[in-house]
Structures are given as C-alpha cells and as structure tokens.
Image: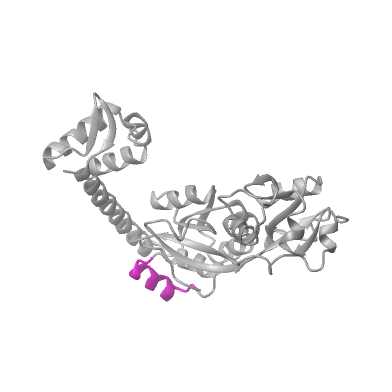
C-alpha cells in the first residue's frame, strides 16, 4: 500500500469513475492507474469498485469506507505540507477563494485590496461558479474556502461560518411606476414582469418563499446568475429587477432607480465554508477576519474543532 495508490483511487472517484480522465489529471497512463488500483484491492482483499468488463460502473460498500479513509489520509498529508510551509514563511503562499459572481464583484473588492496590502507576498486567485460547484471545489481541495449565500450551510463536509446579513431592493427604469409605490408591497411587485437571480443563487429561495406565503405567483421573465446581467435587462425595460442591495450603486447605475425591499423578504446570510479538519495558514485567518471582523482566529478554530455545519453570527 502506498500514497500513490490512495491518490489514484480518490482521483478516479473525482473523475466520475472515468479512469482515463483520472490518469490525465495525474499525468500518468490509464493502464498504470488500473494496475495500481487492482494491486491495492488485492492487498486489502476487497473490491473497491464495481466493474462491467473493464469499465468501472460503481463503488462497493467496503469501497466507500476505503475512499473515505483515503480522502482523510490525503487531507492530513496536505495539512502536514501546509504546516511546513507555514513555518518556512508565514506571509507567503497562495490563497484560492471560490465564490459567486456577486461576492467577487460587490462584496470582496475592498477586502481583497486590504488583504493585498497586508499580505503582499500571497498570490490570491478567485474562482467563480454556482454555489454547489464552488462548495465542491473546497471539498476537493481545489480552493481553500468558499464564500456564498446558498449551499454552504447544508454541504456535508464543510464548516459554515456566517459572515453578514443582507437584503434586497427593487430596481427599474427611472420613470417606472414601481419606484413610486408607497408602500412597496409584494402584490405591487407581482403586477410586473420580473428579472432576478437564478434559483441556485443569492437567496432566491427566500424570494420564492415570500411570494408563496402571500399566494402570489410572480412573473419571472428572466433569471440570471449575477446582478450585472439583471441590471442590463432592467435598463432595457424588460421588467423590474430584484437584486441584492449591495449590487446597486447610484454612481454607476444611472439608467435605473432603486426602492428598498428589505421589509418584504427574510434577510439572507452570506457564509464562508471551510473543509472540515483542514489546516489553515495564518494569512487565511487574516482573510476571513477581513471579510467578517467577528470571525477572528479563536472563533474560526472553535468552529473547526466543533466540526458543526453552522456557527451563528
């Protein structure tokens, strides 16, 4: 048994049981991967994978247990490397942040500016995707932490740290009657075509819940992954928009107006997700505290030690 065999097994699982794809990711040959997995199975005396001919088509029950252990072992090896790197240089390295477009565009610019000034030797990379996708990147070790509103709290394997609460606003062309509605109500909003976030993004589930509670069926004519797209189509008068309040800037969004809608919807919570049992370098703690000042090192360590799925504001 060796570490190479553990890596081969885990990478095959990540590749959806596609041995060829796993071999490419590991910069080796498909026969080599298959042979090492067979040797590993023979040593353990079990089959990890279900086979149909030469193809892998599933994972056996004992195989699931082996894979879980292999993932933990490889994760701990990665932690050992991070410990060494930490003490060689406490302020140098790479920080990979997985986040949604809204976080990258509106919430993080000032944080990243401050981080770059405090840790000039750390190379920071933003990876954008859907909430489920970016959570998986952290679980797979392709990102150090995830920042999003959806999916983080209910993703198994992540420790969830609430950062801040936010709510929504209605946007429309400057002369649209919705901007003069007083009071602004869900019934009034439901009269018009709506442009808002896709169901997987930015607390859209809470918007749906609010309308359903009043027996309303909003006419969503366009759903998008980020506020910039929504604002573009609202400016074209395709409909009124529902976006995060942080995404509206009167200095830039001169073609549209805004009405606050915080009284109509439950507040959403943006969270940071960290893979359980991971070792964090000093500058990762620094970044987290810049995002949310209450998340100091002591709070983060307590959350990681507890291993729970969520830790309140």
Q: Quadrant of residue 80?
A: bottom left
Pick whichever, 79 or 275, lies toward us. Answer: 275
Residue drawn at (85%, 55%) of the image = 176
Is 26 part of what is drawn in magenta? Answer: no
Q: Look at the image and tell me whether residue 202 can be seen.
A: no
Q: Is residue 154 above or below residue 4?
A: below
- Taking the spot 28% from the left edge, 56% from the top edge, the residue there is 76
Q: Is residue 185 left or right of residue 158?
A: right
Q: Position of residue 45 (x, y in %)?
A: 11, 40
Of residues 220 and 141, the one nearer the viewer is 220
* Residue 296 among those drawn in magenta: yes
Could you say where residue 56 lies in the image, as x and y percent from the top left?
28, 31
Q: Say above or below: 302 vs 228.
A: below
Which quadrant, please, contains the N terminus?
top left
Is residue 85 left or right of 266 when viewed as pictured?
left
Residue 8, relative to residue 258: is it above or below?
A: above
**Residue 37 visible at all:** yes
Q: Residue furthest front?
A: 215
Question: Residue 286 placed where, x, y %?
Answer: 49, 68
Q: How many marks?
A: 0
Prevailing secondary structure of the magenta residues: helix
Report the span colored magenta. 295-308
């Amino acid at each position: 048994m060796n570490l190479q065999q553990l890596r081969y097994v885990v990478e095959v699982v990540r590749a959806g049981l596609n041995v060829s794809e796993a071999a490419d990711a590991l910069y080796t040959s498909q026969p080599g991967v298959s042979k090492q997995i067979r040797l590993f199975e023979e040593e353990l005396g079990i089959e990890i994978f279900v086979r149909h001919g030469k193809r892998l088509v599933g994972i056996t029950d004992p195989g699931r247990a082996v894979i879980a252990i292999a993932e933990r072992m490889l994760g701990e090896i990665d932690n050992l490397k991070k410990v060494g790197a930490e003490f060689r240089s406490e302020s140098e390295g790479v920080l990979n942040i997985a986040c949604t477009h809204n976080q990258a565009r509106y919430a993080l610019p000032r944080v990243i500016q401050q981080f770059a000034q405090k840790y000039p030797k750390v190379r920071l990379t933003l990876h954008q995707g859907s909430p489920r996708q970016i959570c998986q990147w952290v679980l797979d070790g392709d990102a150090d932490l995830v920042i999003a509103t959806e999916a983080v709290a209910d993703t198994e394997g992540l420790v969830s740290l609430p950062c801040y609460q936010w709510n929504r606003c209605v946007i429309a062309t400057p002369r649209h009657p919705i901007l003069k509605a007083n009071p602004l109500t869900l019934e009034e909003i439901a009269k018009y075509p709506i442009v808002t976030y896709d169901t997987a993004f930015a607390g859209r589930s809470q918007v749906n819940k609010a309308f359903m509670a009043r027996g309303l069926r909003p006419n969503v004519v366009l759903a998008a992954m980020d506020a910039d797209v929504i604002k573009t189509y609202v400016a074209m008068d395709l409909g009124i928009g529902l976006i995060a309040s942080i995404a509206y800037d009167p200095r830039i969004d001169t073609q549209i107006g805004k009405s606050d809608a915080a009284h109509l919807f439950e507040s959403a919570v943006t969270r940071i997700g960290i893979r359980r049992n991971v070792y964090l370098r000093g500058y990762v703690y620094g970044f987290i505290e810049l995002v949310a000042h209450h998340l100091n090192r002591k709070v983060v360590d307590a959350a990681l030690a507890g291993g729970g799925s969520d830790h309140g504001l």
